[in-house]
Image (cartoon, rainbow, N blue to C red):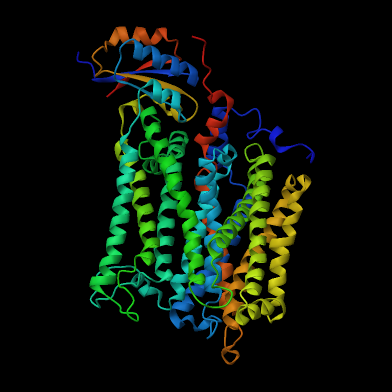
Amino acid sequence: MRRAPVYGLLAEFADVTSLLRAVRKARSAGYQKVDAYTPFPSEELAEALGAHDRRLPLLVLLGGIAGGVAGYALQYWTSTIAYPINVAGRPLHSWPAFIPVTFECTILGAALMAVFGMLALNGLPKPYHPVFNVPRFALSSRDRFFLCIKASDPRYDGVATRDFLQRLEPFEVSEVAS
Amino acid sequence: MNGDRTPQSQPLIAPGYTIGTVSDKISSLVLGHRTPTAWFVGFGLSFVLMTLLLYAIGYLVLVGTGIWGLNVPVAWGFAIINFVWWIGIGHAGTLISAILLLLRQEWRTSINRFAEAMTLFAVASAGIFPLLHVGRPWLAYWLLPYPNTMGVWPNFRSPLVWDVFAVSTYATVSALFWYVGLIPDLATLRDRSKLKVGQIVYGILAMGWRGSVRHWERYETAVLLLAGICTPLVISVHTVVSLDFAVAIVPGWHATFFPPYFVAGAIYAGFAMVLTLAIPLRKAYGLEGLITPRHLNYMGRILLATGLVVGYAYMMELFFAWYSGDIYEEYMMANRFRGPYAPFYWTLIFCNGIAIQALWFQRVRSSALALFIIAMFVNVGMWLERFVIVVTSLSRDFLPSSWGTYAGTRWDWMMFVGSIGLFLTLFFLFIRFLPMISIFEVRTMLPESEIEEEHR
């Protein structure tokens, strides 16, 4: 009988301190493809998992610069080339008057990049994910903390990994169908 | 309530809440079976007021802006007064969600969600007025720069065009910030909803959020960056609104201190509205444990501080009028004191300058009722402030031969009251269908969310 493909093993913990301890042990045991799920953000956990993405701030900076340049270019082009208005010989390229709109466009570009960049890097929207197959995973958005070791990890072994997770004293260990 | 206790000694979240119960408490306000009767009454009344707005807009589209009390010289009537009033109210939401986040003011957690919603709905109510004021609202898209067969482009030297960009950016960014803040809570609602339709709708809106630590890390970075972006944005928006006035040479408008004056007034008006909404809300929904007396006390302090800045600005207006030596500026002030609109001016000074002095007292700041009454004074006072700025200056500017008078017609009043109806209708829908307090942020405030480091 062929077994259904497995995504990984999911261990449930009652509080954030136990989860942090478990993450550190899993990392020191050599597991690479580890993820943790929590009902609120935790800097310590992100550090323990080595989850630090430097790309987002850079994307936001680029979004802001792109917005600002586009905003200024639009004003320059409309005011001097496309539709020049001669007001008593005043300069067409009246840059001080273009600052507010340039500023707003910078903000808009940066904000759009912050939101959509964050979603894209997180791979959202993603309505289906294997961890949702575990019924108790619904509690991860209430008050439970989960550790997942993926089957794609080179050290993953259906029996040994389960034993390892059991020794971390979780609430429950469940297999995640993919 | 004991008025002598200092606010710092009171907890931000009442004792007894755990991560689980706080999640249940806030999500049950949405998913629970029983909607309070007060909600139906409030929503019904607001909806009736909103239909007034729709009726007035319908008639205006048929007949034109002649139904308003606008005239020459007072071509900026209720439409601009209401616009500035509403935009200002929105500013407190962004201040709470962005500036107080950067300043690590943890007490903002319980109030930021509905304050941000308030921002969105206030901007929506504000946006109606300039759109209708252009006269032919179906051509309002002419304000935007787009290639057209007329070969015409907006004049980017005009503050009114800056306004289009500032307000539309503000509306977009506020909506995004609000939605990003909602995503983890929408996931909670998705997981806790027992109805199929709830699971599907909240599921779609939550976009598959699963609380992964890697996701949280980028999420927190994004929120922090958005807060940093929104801080100058919120200041720029009311600055640009004030430039609509300050760039004109009309006496009483042409002043360099208008931007900070307007920004302070906006935050002041906004906190008054946050109090106006928060105090009945916590009562009706039993949220006294989450929006505690300490929160109300802090909001009272901010109201006092910004109110004093506004009071200082009123004095500076007087000083500038005198120090300018300009007879038109001097007359503008005399006209406010003794002219046809003097009752409005003195009522505004009472509401914004004198009534709030009660907030110096701890006893007043710890009484929800007293705070609510003062907030109401400020709501009225700030509307009158904009009325005085717009109407006294325009009705008597330079040449006495071109002076006039202004009064709102019943259509003006219908639209103003109707816009309050629109705002409240949206707000009632929000508290019915979305978590009005940020669940995941309240979780981080609880002692059990702290990591107990063992000695190694």
- Taking B396 as reference, is B160 left or right? left
Residue at the extreme bottom? B401
Q: Where is residue B106 in the image (x, y as percent from the top left)?
A: 57, 37
Q: Choose between B189 and A33: the one closer to the eye.
A: A33
Which of the 4 image quadrants contains residue B45?
A: bottom right
**Residue drawn at point x = 44 percent, y = 37 percent:** B184
**Residue drawn at point x = 71 percent, y = 61 percent:** B353
Q: Choose between A84 and B212: the one closer to the eye.
A: A84
| Quadrant (top left/top right/bottom left/bottom right) for the N terminus of chain B | top right
**Residue drawn at point x = 61 percent, y = 79 percent:** B326
Q: Where is residue A61 in the image (x, y as percent from the top left)?
A: 33, 45
**Residue drawn at point x = 62 percent, y = 67 percent:** B383
- Taking B417 as reference, is B4 left or right? right
Residue at the extreme left? A2
Task: Give the total of numbered labels.
Answer: 0
- In this rendering, the answer to whether B29 lies above or below A96 is above
Observer able to see residue B210: no
- Taking A102 as reference, is B249 left or right? right
Q: Position of residue B179 (x, y in %)?
A: 43, 46
Q: Choose between B91 and B417: the one closer to the eye.
A: B91
- In this rendering, the answer to whether B191 lies above or below A5 is below
Q: Position of residue A45 (x, y in %)?
A: 42, 23
Observer able to see residue B450: yes
Q: Choose between B414 and A105: the one closer to the eye.
A: A105
- Taking A31 as reference, is B132 left or right? right
Which of the 4 image quadrants contains residue A59?
A: top left
